[in-house]
Image (cartoon, rainbow, N blue to C red):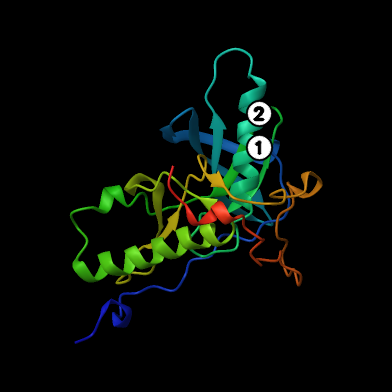
Amino acid sequence: MPGPADDDRIPEAVAPHTLSDFGYGDLEKGKRIGTGGDADVYRATLDQDGYTYPIAVKEPRFEGTIRKRVFQRFETEAETWESLNHHENVVSVYTWGAEPLPWLALEFMDGGTLEAQLGSIDVAEALWLSGRIAEGIRYGHRHGVAHLDIKPTNVLLRDTPEGKWDYPKVSDWGWPRCYWTTPIASRESHRRMPRRNSSTPRSTEAPTISPTSTNWGR
């Protein structure tokens, strides 16, 4: 009997767009599409080389002056999330910055959330989805990061051709527990993005993890 790995509805992995460097001022920010914790997510667009690309932009929610701890926490989230960029089941970070406010530019997930699909997924698709989600979480673990907030609203989907299942990616790495024994990323390189035709992608070799890394719970 065929298993979920043999189903012809399984899609190919959906990659993020490959974009040249851009800044906050290059984005045309639209409506808010998500909210949670102390941040909001907006749908934005970016014009490059004659194409208009959808981008998800995450910003902290605040009133008045932004506190220093908000900057620090947002920077930690950005560095942590960006360090997991090279897995097909993790939502990609394009770039981020702190001016005119902390912001994070993310792969736009046009298929919505897994939560919205609950009740309409058959057993084969549920098994396949579970495996792909687990691979994304495992990749974080291998790189010293535990997500700590996995739920259907934090699993986002990319649209695929008709007759194929939507492709899942784990999002919202904003409350991770890190087990790194060295800094997550160089401060000087935190705004770098993969460029077109790059022949030197960032290394995905897992760093040395401390003995406490076997405990992934709170």
Within-10-Å neighbours for mark 2: few <14, some 14–19, many 20+: some
Q: Residue furthest front?
A: 211
The C terminus - image quarter: top left
Looking at the image, residue 82 lies above or below residue 3: above
**Picture coordinates of residue 217 (x, y %)?**
43, 47
**Picture coordinates of residue 67 (x, y %)?**
64, 19
**Picture coordinates of residue 41 (x, y %)?**
49, 36
Q: Is residue 16 left or right of residue 5?
A: right
Between 135 and 178, the residue placed more toward the observer is 178
Looking at the image, residue 155 lies above or below residue 63: below
Asked which secondary structure carries label 1, the reply is: helix
User: Residue beneath label 2, please?
Assistant: 71
Q: Residue at x 61, y 55 (%)?
A: 210
The N terminus - image quarter: bottom left
The reply to whether discs 1 and 2 touch (Cβ–Cβ < 8 Å) is yes
- Is residue 166 something one can see in this rendering? yes
User: Residue beneath label 1, please?
Assistant: 75
Q: Residue furthest right?
A: 188
Q: Is residue 189 left or right of residue 136?
A: right
